[in-house]
């Protein structure tokens, strides 16, 4: 799906891919949300959301209808994919981090990686010294440990607050690869989340244009 990033909202390739992905979903209905700086096409039953941004000075009107959009002035800027959250105390294969979405039904997803040079690793002892692998499979069961092993230490990370912080789930961002992941389940929240997070499964995968600088 990464190859879709940057395509115009009028792209036949983009919508052919979305339609092929959703062909086994009975209800292909989407909701379109227009904000002042972006447009979301939300596919709740497919477990996927597409975020478009305006180009060439195009101005969006918040809460405008889909029919008023100039699709030729919108490009795909990000894709969110939702995974089921496994909680041994209350297992529910249809629960996601956002209850409005069902889990994406077409896993695993093959993700293409950008080669990483040694100088891009921040000299961390736990960072991989060199990434030669060009692909990574996001399985339903992929954990934080799996991701760090394959991608190295993230460029940015956050979350993991305790009760006073609202128990925010941990997240990691690998900007060079254009991959941001929010984790789910009990291992992803609380004051010790960064200790237990290695066993947490991913909850939301966000794809965007890699920063290869």
Image: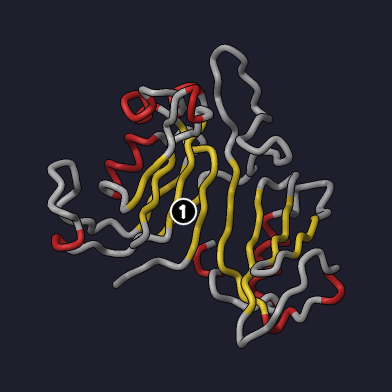
Q: Is residue 204 left or right of residue 13?
A: left
Badge 1 is on which residue? 110
Q: Position of residue 144 (x, y in %)?
A: 37, 36
Foreground residue among 212 and 84:
212
Residue at x 64%, y 77% (from the top left corner): 54
Q: Position of residue 172 (x, y in %)?
A: 39, 45
Residue at x 76%, y 60% (from the top left corner): 33
Q: Is residue 86 left or right of residue 190?
A: right
Which quadrant of the rendered structure holds the C terminus? bottom left
The relative height of residue 178 versus residue 202 in the rendered view (above or below) is below
Foreground residue among 170 and 117:
170
Q: Is residue 78 left or right of residue 190?
A: right
Furthest toward the front, the residue is 164
Q: Position of residue 34 (x, y in %)?
A: 75, 65
Which quadrant of the rendered structure holds the N terminus? bottom right
Quarter of the image for residue 67 reads bottom right
The relative height of residue 44 versus residue 13 in the rendered view (above or below) is above
Residue at x 45%, y 51% (from the top left corner): 180
The relative height of residue 127 versus residue 189 in the rendered view (above or below) is below
Q: Position of residue 14 (x, y in %)?
A: 65, 70
Residue at x 49%, y 25% (from the top left corner): 164
Foreground residue among 151 and 160:
160
Furthest toward the bottom, the residue is 56
């Amino acid at each position: 799906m990464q190859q879709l990033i940057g395509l115009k909202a009028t792209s036949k390739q983009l919508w052919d891919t979305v339609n092929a992905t959703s062909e086994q979903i009975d209800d292909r209905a989407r909701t379109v949300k227009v904000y002042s700086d972006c447009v979301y096409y939300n596919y709740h039953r497919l477990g996927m959301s597409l975020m478009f941004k305006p180009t060439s000075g195009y101005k969006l009107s918040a809460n405008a209808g889909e029919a008023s959009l100039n699709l030729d002035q919108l490009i795909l800027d990000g894709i969110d994919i939702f995974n089921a959250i496994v909680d041994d105390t209350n297992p529910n294969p249809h629960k996601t981090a956002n209850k409005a979405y069902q889990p994406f039904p077409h896993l695993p997803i093959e993700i293409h990686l950008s080669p990483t040079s040694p100088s891009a690793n921040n000299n961390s002892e736990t960072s991989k010294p060199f990434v030669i692998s060009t692909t990574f499979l996001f399985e339903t069961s992929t954990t934080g440990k799996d991701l760090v092993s394959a991608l190295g230490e993230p460029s940015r990370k956050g979350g993991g607050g305790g009760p006073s912080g609202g128990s925010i789930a941990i997240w990691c961002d690998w900007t060079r690869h254009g991959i941001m992941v929010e984790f789910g389940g009990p291992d992803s929240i609380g004051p010790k989340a960064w200790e237990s997070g290695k066993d947490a499964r991913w909850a939301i995968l966000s794809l965007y244009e890699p920063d290869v600088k």
